[in-house]
Image: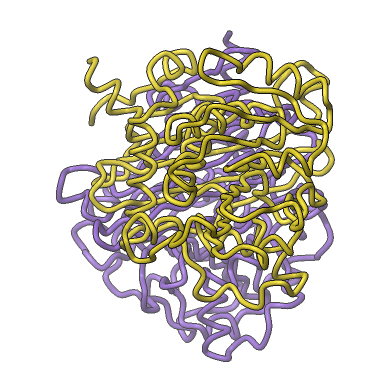
Chain colours: A yellow, B purple
Amino acid sequence: MSEIRVLTEDQLRGAIHLDAALIAVIEDAFATLARGGVVMPQVLSMHMPDVNGELDVKTAYVPGLPGFAVKLSPGFFDNPARGLPSTSGLMVVLSSQTGRVQAVLLDNGYLTDLRTAAAGGVAARHLSRPDSARAAIFGAGLQARMQLQALCLVRPIREAVIWARDPARAGALAASMTKPGLTVRAEADPARAAGFGDVIVTTTPATQPILRAGWLRAGQHLTAMGSDQAGKNELDPRCLDRADLYVADRVGQTRLMGELRAALEAGIVATADGLPELGDIIAGHHPGRTDPGQITIADLTGTGVQDTAIATHALAAFSKDS
Amino acid sequence: MSEIRVLTEDQLRGAIHLDAALIAVIEDAFATLARGGVVMPQVLSMHMPDVNGELDVKTAYVPGLPGFAVKLSPGFFDNPARGLPSTSGLMVVLSSQTGRVQAVLLDNGYLTDLRTAAAGGVAARHLSRPDSARAAIFGAGLQARMQLQALCLVRPIREAVIWARDPARAGALAASMTKPGLTVRAEADPARAAGFGDVIVTTTPATQPILRAGWLRAGQHLTAMGSDQAGKNELDPRCLDRADLYVADRVGQTRLMGELRAALEAGIVATADGLPELGDIIAGHHPGRTDPGQITIADLTGTGVQDTAIATHALAAFSKDS
């Protein structure tokens, strides 16, 4: 019986970053999902209304990888008033051969932040126009920052706008991200923000649409990554009708908790059957964007296979050290 | 942000035992479940057929407790050929106030073994006749041993018989458990074993019934704790018809993966609606056994609230130390 490796948030932050290698890892995870053989159960969700908290547990088994991750993601929404982030959690890595615990990654959600941002990069790489130079980010939180960073890794982004309900936060984020070769500014008008982006990313916890279908223009790619629960909704459901191509990270999830859910409920989309997944495009099972004028949408809810992939990536980094 | 406590299997084995205090903790957990307010989602189950493995994730939130546990229970059934136990796993304890990780209990299934045995003790305390002096145990594994130990904590057991498919294992277990005041012997005839016990406990992974309804006699209590998945079945479904009282640990689970499932499928039990749970009896919502001649059955599949209870109990023991 080998030792159980326990890695702290500080250790993980020091070793694992949002970079091209990580995007390749997450891209490969989606392709593996499309090729079949991956076992990915429905998310276990527990709501604790009296403490304004929730817990999600995700996992996925990927044949051929040495281990699989089980991720615990708590969200406790009274935390900010206590000076704590709402989300935290950890990942446990179990051996694919014996089931025994190999490692506990006490990341407090850091690896989730990374793999979520990396998925945005993967979506943009496979769905946006290769010449995309302008980004529009909706939201001003941590994922707003990281999604823009991810975009810059896969597309020649030179200008970006940030729209957020709180203009001061949008301005602060824009100022902190401007650097040589990248100009970022806040945009108070969401319609103008949407029109600006060759790539648009929505990163908010909105429960009512913040992006209207009429604001979209030919050639754009839009990634909606804020919705990960049945009550959330960032896009006017008509966006899905307006788009030439809708792609889910996992249809079984987006129909329950992504933008697809709202579009199905509104009757804008008749059925989830046959909709492509991001992995299908990476694996070459679906052509993806076939014309520069098309509008594409990626609906990302976060999948257990991303967790297993990044946990494996993180453990491998530390195995090299030891 | 406080430190995350990591406790090893050795530490936990040294501090937490199957004793009267633990049985009281688990008894209280069942009563709490009956009183309402507990949030206990469906078990997350993942099957990995190519490596003959499975993973169960259980959790329960109990209002008023400082934390809640999430338990990962892997079962990898090729492990014995490698010299490893099939089951292992850990529990993570999260704060009920902030969701942040408080502790990781690297117990390799030890706490599950304890809380499972303790539940058997709780069932016998509330359903068997107080004068029960004879036990019959079906199975010769770790739970066979622990269930008999638990019975001895709640009833004046003086004699016990062990039946197992492998008579040599039954004999070895019996020999190892005989001590002053307790005579244990192997019994090769399952009908005679069943007839012997004032309390019967089945602890096997059987997928076909090992106990026939015709073997039961008036006054007995029977706890079936082996079935915890849809494919398992220890009792002839007619046992449930023969019994005067059937009690589930959680009807929502036993109808899917306990003895109740097989009885529903066989049409022996018409509906799961209205069946009492162990907590109902402890909390006084149901009278339980009302006559010494009755036959009672407890169907135990294992619940997340037991995990949260024992994890809280374990953490409290270490908090006193520190």
Residue B183 in view, yes or no: no
Residue B82 is left or right of residue B298, and the answer is left
* Vertical order, A152 against B252 (above or below): above
Q: Quadrant of the N terminus of chain B?
A: top right
As drawn, which residue projects farthest toward the bottom? Answer: B267
Q: Which percent across, then down, holds residue B171?
A: 24, 56
Nearest the eye: A191 or B206: A191
Q: Which percent across, then down, holds residue B151?
A: 52, 50
Q: Quadrant of the C terminus of chain B?
A: top right
Image point (31%, 56%), residue name: B53
Q: Which percent across, then down, holds residue B212?
A: 43, 82
Nearest the eye: B66 or A308: A308
As drawn, which residue projects farthest toward the top? Answer: B322
Residue A250 in view, yes or no: yes
Q: Which percent across, then down, holds residue A225?
A: 61, 45
Nearest the eye: B84 or A48: A48
Nearest the eye: B111 or B286: B111
* Vertical order, A300 against B163 (above or below): above
Residue A66 is left or right of residue A190, and the answer is left
Image point (32%, 65%), residue name: B163
